[in-house]
Image (cartoon, rainbow, N blue to C red):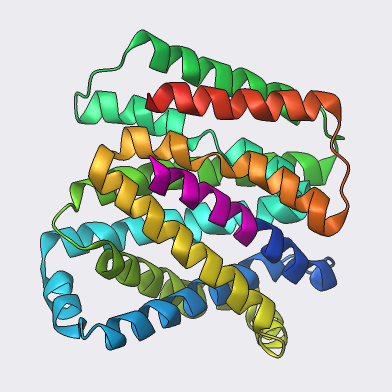
Amino acid sequence: MISGLAGGFLWALDTVILSLVLAPFSMSFAAPLAATALHDAFSALWLALLATIRRRWSSVVRAIKHKDGRRVMLAALLGGPVGMAGYVMAIRFLGPGLAASISSFYPALGLAASALLFHEPVKRHQVAGMVLSLVCLVLMSGQAAGGTDFWLGILCALCSTAGWAAEGLLVQKAASLDNDIALLLRQSVSGAVFWILVLPLFGGLPVALSMAQSPWLVAAASLAGTASYLCYYLAIHRIGAARAMPLNITYCAWAVVLAWVFQGTTVSGPEAVFCAGVILGGVLSAW
């Protein structure tokens, strides 16, 4: 449980730093995709450095050949180009607080899918937690102004919700892999797909190269994100995806707090109440 909560805080820190990365590129539609590509590439470099220090490259090769390694690679496609790209685009259109809050509904979706696919028992308080999270997320969304960008941001956040829920279930099935090895495969595949396919398709290569000229914020965000994923994967393998995902969504509250501390954003009373409801619902779902 501590690993899941730590992953939530670190992901909130990642969220706020990424919003600072995106700020100078607010006019570019491809900026969120470029930031995501750099984020996952830097994360893969951090993990490759860890694998080198720990002399784990033989384990990486074995994991690539194993069926669990292929599950993680599929999870990378759903969690990266679908989940992470949708999340960063939602940050741009909605801001870090609202983007984090909406996308944090993915544990409820994961819990429902886990019950259907893996036949895990679902108790009444877990269902109540899912309903509470959903209601609070809908009410929180109503606190923001409408418009084209708003609804596009909602769509992006929902894409991240679906992608991350599917990723968590696939990672749970890849239980034979160590967390650092699984995450190295995940970030490497995700980063490669972004650079080879997504960025050229959406014209994001020039933006990514421009961001790379001042890489320190992206490197810091990816370091926080890497640590968050390691904590998250550890929680998945210890208590299961259906319980680890709700613990991880505490990032929605931390994102609002950190955005207030570092960016001076205002937090209304209803937003604070709804955010607390999302967290409470997540904890109930994991209990």
Query: Percent x, y for residue 219?
Result: 59, 78
Residue 6 is a magenta residue: yes
Check the picture and name the quadrant holding the N terminus.
top left
Query: Percent x, y for residue 140?
Result: 73, 28
> 33 or 173: nearer the eye?
173
In this picture, residue 275 sits left or right of residue 68: right
Kindly indicate the quadrant of the structure image that contains residue 98. top right
Number of numbered callouts drawn: 0
Q: Is residue 124 above or below residue 186?
A: above
Check the picture and name the quadrant holding the C terminus.
top left
Report if residue 189 is visible in the image. yes
| Magenta span of residues | 1-14
Query: Percent x, y for residue 76?
Result: 37, 61
The residue located at (37%, 8%) in the rendering is 124
The residue located at (65%, 22%) in the rendering is 136
> 121 or 209: nearer the eye?
121
Q: Residue furthest bottom?
A: 213
Residue 122 is a magenta residue: no
The residue located at (58%, 45%) in the rendering is 251
In this picture, residue 131 sits left or right of residue 258: left
In this picture, residue 135 sits left or right of residue 107: right
